[in-house]
Image (cartoon, rainbow, N blue to C red):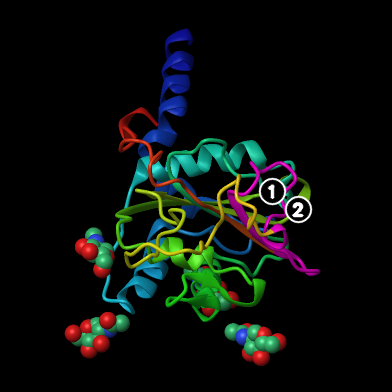
Amino acid sequence: MWGFATLATILLLSLPDHADSTRLSDLRDSIGRRPLSRPTEFLAAHNKIRAMHNLTSLSWNRMLARYARRWANTRLDDCKNLEHSPNSPFGENLFWGLRDHWNASKVVKYWGDEVQNYDPLTNECLNNSVCGHYTQIVWNTTQSVGCTHALCNNNEGHLFVCSYDPPGNIYYQGPFGGRFGKCIVYPPSSDRSSSTLSGSPHAPTGITAITANNRDFISGTTGHPANLTPPKFNLNNV
Ligand SMILES: *[C@@H]1O[C@H](CO)[C@@H](O)[C@H](O)[C@H]1NC(C)=O
Ligand SMILES: *[C@@H]1O[C@H](CO)[C@@H](O)[C@H](O)[C@H]1NC(C)=O
Ligand SMILES: *[C@@H]1O[C@H](CO)[C@@H](O)[C@H](O)[C@H]1NC(C)=O
Ligand SMILES: *[C@@H]1O[C@H](CO)[C@@H](O)[C@H](O)[C@H]1NC(C)=O
């Protein structure tokens, strides 16, 4: 009996490390209707957007996905606050949506549609809009992505977290290279830190850009310093 119980516990504890995608596709939304998003959905949606710019495809990184999931799992009681993981060495796109129609394809497409808000000549988001989720997706030095789609507690909707390595949205740089006087996401110290884009009370000042609206979804992204970009994070330690 003891032997069996111990073995079962070990199997249970070791399962998540080996069965990420299985577990994801086995989970259902809060009313049991459909599976939560699969890695292939996240990845295909990202690479469709990158292909439009002839950029190399991102690869799926399970350790980035685990990093994203671990962060998401700490946020499920207050998804709407859209808090970013502090000091993450990765780029990070977040999305919270209350309604059940949100899935990986829709969320990533929503981010990609910010292309209309981005001015590549000046490297800024037009009309105080948000374009940083899009620019992270098409950042040409970013190579891999890992995402998670989690259900928030108390039927409070869906939380999506994508982590990117190396991170994009480097201050004063553009997604396709080049240095600019303007930023997609302004650094914390900057006077230009666009307060209209910085809405999360718990996020480190200036590194988040928020799509706020009166409706039932919101998204945020991060910016990163060029000189302080951490040496390539050892993903094996995540
Ligand atoms: C992508 O490559 C195709 C074929 O080489 C070219 O016609 C197109 O203009 C390129 N698109 C961009 C956005 O660079
Ligand atoms: C995601 O949502 C869109 C729009 O509602 C839908 O067309 C698509 O089939 C969904 N994808 C999956 C995998 O459920
Ligand atoms: C920006 O705002 C101006 C004036 O309101 C408007 O004419 C223009 O279409 C807007 N541009 C975009 C990309 O939304
Ligand atoms: C990114 O774009 C810059 C500027 O065009 C180019 O020099 C660099 O080689 C590109 N990097 C990658 C990984 O495509």
Q: Which residue is mark 2?
A: 156
Q: Which residue is mark 1?
A: 152
**Is the residue marked by circle 2 packed among few (<14), some (14-19), or many (20+) residues within 10 Å?**
some
Specify the quarter for ligand 3: bottom right
Residue 106 found in image quarter: bottom right
Residue 47, disc: none
Task: Give the left or right position of residue 64, taking residue 96 as reference.
Answer: left
For residue 233, above or below residue 226:
above
Residue 90 visible from this viewpoint: yes
Residue 139: x and y in percent read 37, 62
| Three-letter residue code for mark 1 | Cys
Distance of mark 2 from mark 1, alpha carbons?
5 Å
Judged by its main secondary structure, the magenta piece is loop
- On the image, the x and y values in percent for residue 158 come to 65, 56
Q: Which residues are magenta?
A: 195-217
Q: How many marks on residues? A: 2
Residue type at numbered disc 2: Glu
| Residue at (55, 77) in percent of width and height | 117
- The C terminus lies in quadrant: top left
Q: Quadrant of residue 96?
A: bottom right
Pointer 2 with pointer 1, Cβ within 8 A: yes
Looking at this view, name the residue that lies furthest to the right: 214
